Image: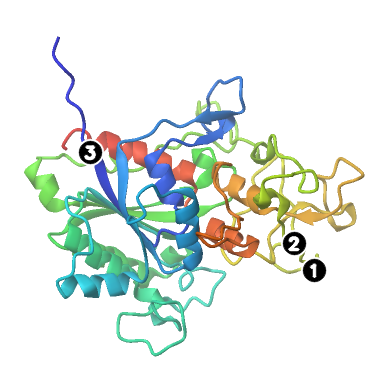
Amino acid sequence: MKKEKKMKKIRHISLFSGCGGMDIGLQGGFKVHKKFVKKKSISNWVLMPKTKIETVFANDIKKSSYNFWQENILKDQSIFKLGSIVDFVKDFKKGKKVFPKNIDLVTGGFPCQDFSVSGLRKGFNSHKSHLNDYKVIKKNESRGKLYLWMKEVISITKPKIFIAENVKGLTNLKHIFETIKNDFKKTGDGYTVAVKELYAPNYGIPQSRKRIFFVGVNNKFIKSKKIKLNIDDLFPEREFNKSESLFDSLPIYPLAQHFFDDLKEPSEEKYDLAQKSYSKAKYIKGLQGQTEVKELGIAPTIRSEHHGNIEFRYLDKANGGTNIKKKEISQRRLSVRECARIQTFPDNLKFVFNNKDKNGLSASEGYKLIGDAVPPLLSYKFAKKIEKFLIKYL
């Protein structure tokens, strides 16, 4: 009997890694609610099989990100590099060994604050540097131009595929959007670039999250392997529908209430600091974040800078709340763990902890990391498409 050829690992570089939402999803091996993946199971939670994707380099400038990776993800402590990608590229050009070789995939959610509708929308003219401070900014080293440094890493490592993620608001800044897309096309030997907006509920995540993804395939790789490229091979397929239709056999969106299955109230939780921790910010009518999660609908988008004005898990009836079912539960905002659940992070990850050896992570930092992330389940669905595509040619 002929032995089946063992597929080698897909070597992956992660940029602007945050708390690894993209990376956890790409590698698989985590649990999600069965309703989000249409699985039949006795348990509410099912395991997503591991993929062939292996993260060999990750980076971020935030110490909170470093602390999270040290506590939760890393077996090899050398993989995560704390610092700016600008400085790493400069070090490489000085002859230092920075990036691993033989890279198949590069991913990165380059900073979105300068393109977001909820931000100042300064675009390329960001008021902050690549280190996210207010120091003198050199040409092409502002926070708004960090995609150029992701482009540099792609040029250096020459991956077969790259994935870049950003907020939907980027597409409304047409000149900036087209500039970024064309710059990615001209990277290295050239890339064929496709862009698509993904709406989380279409992929089984009942959260009103919309993000755009640039996916580029190396033109030299396409030519050498004689690939007949179909853009649909690069993006996950829509799995759920808004409502039932005679012309669409897809199931309707799962309900947000499933995010909270099996969770204890913060006052009852003894061990998980992320569930015990929640914002105590008061209700102020008219400001962002003063709404309650719709259990029988879609949860709100979990945002960065979300520690003070995070939405409510339970809102008083006088303020329009409907979720409170027990008299002993008072009005409160979403806990850190509940935000992580809405982003489809598994419960074994610590988003609030104290560790004398590896430093800690506060609730405020946990909220921010979660809000910045790509939902791991969405990333996993990307991973299965990329894996299937690459398996033919590696």
219 horizontally vs 379: left or right: left
| Mark before the other along the chain sequence, 3 or 1 | 1
- Mark 3 vs mark 2, CA separation in Å: 45 Å
- Mark 3 vs mark 1, CA separation in Å: 50 Å
Near mark 2 (Cα within 10 A), the count class, few <14, some 14-19 or many ≥20, is: some
Near mark 3 (Cα within 10 A), the count class, few <14, some 14-19 or many ≥20, is: some
Q: Is residue 322 above or below residue 204?
A: below
Image coordinates of residue 188 in percent, x first then y, are 15, 62
User: Which residue is the extreme one toward the front?
Assistant: 357
| For the residues bearing labels 1 and 2, Cβ distance under 8 angstroms | yes
Q: Amino acid at mark 1?
A: Ile
Residue 60 visible:
yes
Task: Name the residue that disc number 3 marks.
Answer: 390
Q: Is residue 295 above or below residue 90?
A: above
User: Which residue is the extreme one toward the bottom?
Assistant: 136
Q: Is residue 89 above or below residue 275?
A: below
Q: Quadrant of the N terminus?
A: top left
321 horizontally vs 244: left or right: right
